[in-house]
Image (spheres, rainbow, N blue to C red):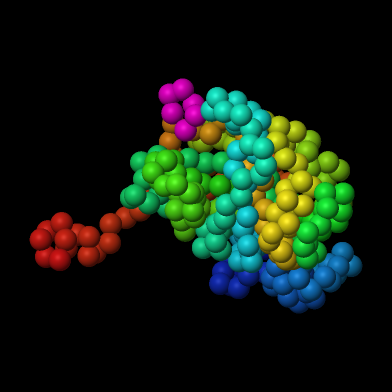
Amino acid sequence: MRLLAFALAGDPQRPRLGRRNADGVHDLTDALGSDLGTLIVSGVDPGDAAGPLVDPAEMALLAPLPRPGKIICVGLNYHDHCREQGIDPPAYPILFSKFANAVAHPGQVVVRPRATDRLDLECELGVVIGRRAKSVGREAAMEHVFGYTVVNDVTMRDLQREDSQWLRAKGSDGFAPMGPEVVTRDEIADPQRLGVRSSVNGETWQDSSTSEMVFDVATLVAFASRTITLEPGDLIATGTPAGVGHFQDPPRYLHDGDVMRCEIDGIGAIENRVADEQPRIDDHAVAAGLG
């Protein structure tokens, strides 16, 4: 199944739940409610639910998981990303977190904070947890996966270098664009054989495969669950491959008006435009000596 969240043009403030079939998107809201996260927690199988077709012209995509309970991210998890930095792969997964404030919808503007001059993108496979996982073994880990989505781990490289941890650099508002859908586990034959690509203004930055992962999906789920209970609706962002702007020669960063695109085979693509943060009124007052 391919499940998604959307809003209708005539009711933009009301999120709705949909399933993409061969004939288009069916609105499942009346049958199953509007929140995919709640549906995953409930354990209800949405496969037999019916709903009307939605006119694509009336539909705006939303992040499929607008408020995950946990967003667990993985650093340095691609061999080619380690090679481009001239470092050895880590001996065990490096975990860090984002919060729900970082989630952004497909098509939503991502604001570049005034705190950074070195904004970057990272295209990542997102793993959605479907069953509670506590100290699960690698051999059983995939049974706890509900499905997959695309995540852009937007990063301020200058703040990442300044800090001894990565929360501030990666956890800002809108720094986790997500979507366009959650594709259930049965639709992806092998999550370690998926093409991963990103581009900026149509120019390719990343072009790799999940086969480059240092630690595969099953290992990541098992490792995280040793000390962190994974709950239905939680999200694991599994790391990014080579090609991010910071490690290009010369380095390249995102600027006002740039359009980021992240795409993973079998799941789809999301695009988000970058816009510079605008000064607040009180900032103008300070600059004028009035604050």
Can you see residue 27?
Answer: no
Quadrant where the N terminus is found in the figure: bottom right
- Which residue, as the protein is rendered here, is positioned at the far top? 249
Query: Which residue is more in the foreground, 219 or 256?
Result: 219
Which residue is rendered at x = 57% and y = 28% of the image? 87
Left or right placement of residue 118 versus residue 70 in this view: left
Q: Quadrant of residue 55?
A: bottom right
In this view, the residue in front, 16 or 210, is 210
Q: Position of residue 284 (x, y in %)?
A: 19, 59
Q: Quadrant of residue 224?
A: bottom right
Tell me if residue 290 can be seen: yes
In this picture, residue 196 sits left or right of residue 155: right
When the figure is inspected, residue 174 is found, relative to residue 207, above or below; the finding is below
What segment carries the magenta color?
Answer: 246-251
**Residue positioned 48% across, 40% down in the render:** 120
Q: Looking at this rendering, what residue extends furthest in the left direction?
A: 289
Front residue (pair 142, 35): 142
Q: Main secondary structure of the magenta part?
A: loop
Query: Residue 257 magenta-drawn?
Result: no
Left or right, residue 2 beside residue 161:
right
Residue 50 picture location, percent across and down: 84, 69
Q: Which of the pair 227/287 is nearer the observer? A: 227
Q: Residue 279 appears at what percent x and percent y?
A: 28, 57
Where residue 117 appears, as percent x and y from the top left, is: 36, 41
